[in-house]
C-alpha cells in the first residue's frame, strides 16, 4: 500500500493504549499518528491529525467513547471509528455503532483480527460487531418487535435526524436517544442507521406516523 493507514488510539489506560499502538505498528501499512486518553483529546487530535481510523475505548473518564464517536463522526465524517472495549453488552455495542462507529471489537482481539478489521473498515467494506460480520438476512415485519416509541425514533432516523435531533424532537435526553437507536439496531439485526432506515422505508413506516 502506497499510502499508510493513519490511526489514532484512544484509551484512558496508558499501558493498554501503548500496547495497542505497538501491536499495530508491526503492520507495514499502518502509521500510529497519535494517542489520546479521553474523548475530548481524541476530538481535538482528529481536527489536527485527520486520522483515517480512530480506535476508540468505550468507557473513559470525561467524554466517553459513545459521545466522542458521535462528535468525531459529525465533525470528521471521513474518519472511520472502531470501538474497542472489555464489555460486551449488546445494547452498548449497538449504541456505539449507532453513534457512528464502523465496527466494534473486544480488547481480547488478536493481532490478525484487529489488523483485518482495520484493513476492511478503512475500505468501507464491512461493519462488524464484536468481531463478527453482521448478517444481512432478515425476515418480514422486523419492526413488529419495536415499541411504539422506538418506531417513532426509527421514523425520525429514516428521515435523516441525528441522535441529538431525535432527542430534541421527542423530548429525550441524549443518552436516551442513543439507547433507543442502539436498541433499534439490535432488534432489527442491522449494523448501521442506513440499514435500519431501509427497513423503515420497506415497511412503509415513514408515512405511518405524522411526526
Image (cartoon, rainbow, N blue to C red):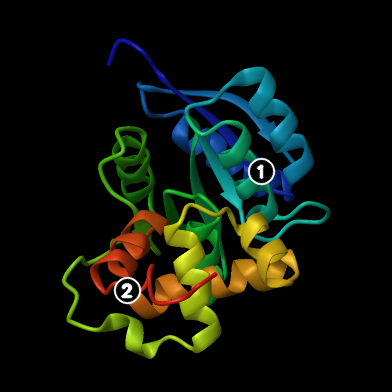
7 w.r.t. 179: above or below: above
The residue identified by callout 2 is 189
The total of numbered circles placed on residues is: 2
Residue at the image point whose x is 36% and y is 73% from the top = 205
Residue 13 visible in this rendered orientation of the protein: yes
The residue carrying pointer 1 sits among few (fewer than 14), some (14 to 19) or many (20 or more) residues within 10 Å by Cα, namely some
Whole-percent x, y for residue 123 in the image: 29, 33
Which part of the image, by quadrant, shows the C terminus? bottom right
Residue at the image point whose x is 61% and y is 48% from the top = 69
Distance between the alpha carbons at the discs numbered 1 and 2? 25 Å
| Res 185 → quadrant | bottom left
Between residues 147 and 201, which one lies in front from this camera angle? 201
- Dot 2 falls on a residue whose secondary structure is loop
The residue identified by callout 1 is 71
| Res 141 → quadrant | bottom left
| Res 4 → quadrant | top left
209 w.r.t. 33: above or below: below
Residue 101 shows which numbered tag?
none
Whole-percent x, y for residue 5 in the image: 41, 24
Amino acid at each position: 500500500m502506497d499510502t499508510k493507514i493513519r490511526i489514532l488510539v484512544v484509551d484512558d489506560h496508558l499501558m493498554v493504549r501503548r500496547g495497542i499502538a505497538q501491536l499495530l505498528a508491526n503492520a507495514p501499512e499502518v502509521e500510529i499518528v497519535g494517542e489520546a486518553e479521553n474523548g475530548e483529546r481524541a476530538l481535538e487530535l482528529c481536527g489536527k491529525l485527520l486520522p483515517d481510523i480512530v480506535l476508540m475505548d468505550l468507557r473513559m473518564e470525561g467524554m466517553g467513547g459513545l459521545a466522542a464517536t458521535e462528535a468525531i463522526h459529525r465533525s470528521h465524517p471521513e474518519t472511520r471509528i472502531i470501538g474497542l472495549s472489555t464489555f460486551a453488552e449488546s445494547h452498548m455495542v449497538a449504541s456505539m455503532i449507532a453513534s457512528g462507529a464502523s465496527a466494534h471489537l473486544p480488547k481480547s482481539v488478536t493481532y490478525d483480527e484487529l489488523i483485518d478489521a482495520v484493513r476492511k473498515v478503512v475500505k468501507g467494506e464491512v461493519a462488524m460487531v464484536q468481531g463478527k460480520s453482521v448478517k444481512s438476512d432478515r425476515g418480514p415485519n422486523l419492526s413488529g418487535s419495536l415499541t411504539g416509541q422506538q418506531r417513532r425514533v426509527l421514523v425520525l432516523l429514516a428521515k435523516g435526524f441525528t441522535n441529538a435531533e431525535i432527542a430534541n424532537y421527542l423530548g429525550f435526553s441524549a443518552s436516551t436517544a442513543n439507547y433507543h437507536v442502539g436498541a433499534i439496531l439490535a432488534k432489527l439485526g442491522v449494523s448501521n442507521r442506513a440499514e435500519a432506515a431501509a427497513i423503515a422505508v420497506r415497511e412503509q413506516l415513514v408515512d405511518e406516523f405524522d411526526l
